[in-house]
Image: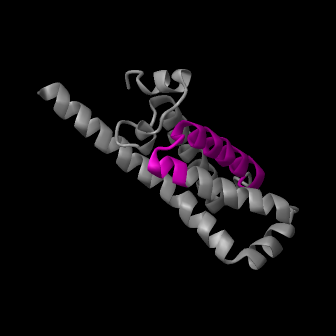
Amino acid sequence: MIDTMKACLSDAVLLAGRLLLALIFVHEGTTLATHFTGTVTAMAAVGISAPLVVCVIALQLGAGLAIASGILARIGAVLLGLFCLATATMFHMDFANQNELLHFEKDLAIAGGMFLLAVSGPGRLSLDRLLPLPTYVAASRNRPS
């Protein structure tokens, strides 16, 4: 009984963590898409092209929703973890500016959380448990957490 309670608590915590990690990306992706013209203009000022902006929006929304729902969450977590590392090193390297240092550290922390999620998996409270997957993928979801 205690093991069952621990497993339920563990799955609930994984769900809460997934939702919290996904929130920032789904919100930001939605904001960028909603204000697409302004986003493209602002990103062009720092050398980022419109097609790359579209890719970033798709990544944030797609991987964010994958993590929230638990469908292909490991892949989404790795992609967003790498995205956070890229964002930190491309945009937040002015450590003399306290705000930039804070954003750099925040991006590193989110990347760490994403990589932990990629290793642990989404838990049993995820939609991917309902999908028929190839044997090699299904075996990875049954690994102990």
Q: Residue at x 62, y 62 (%)?
A: 99
Outermost front residue: 132
Q: Which of the 4 quarters of the picture holds residue 85?
A: top right
* Vertical comparison of 33 with 61: above or below: below
Q: Is residue 72 magenta?
A: yes
* Vertical comparison of 139 with 41: above or below: above
Outermost left residue: 1
Quick one: 105 or 12, which is closer to the camera?
Answer: 12
* Vertical comparison of 21 with 115: above or below: below
| Spot occupied by residue 89 in the image (x, y as percentages of width and height) | 74, 47
Q: Residue at x 21, y 32 (%)?
A: 6
Q: Residue at x 72, y 57 (%)?
A: 56
* Vertical comparison of 6 with 60: above or below: above
Q: Residue at x 32, y 43 (%)?
A: 13
Q: Is residue 82 magenta?
A: yes
Quick one: 115 or 142, which is closer to the camera?
Answer: 142
Check the picture and name the quadrant holding the C terminus. Answer: top left
| Spot occupied by residue 105 in the image (x, y as percentages of width and height) | 59, 48
> Which residues, given as a range, are shown in magenta?
65-92
Magenta: main secondary structure: helix
| Spot occupied by residue 133 in the image (x, y as percentages of width and height) | 52, 31
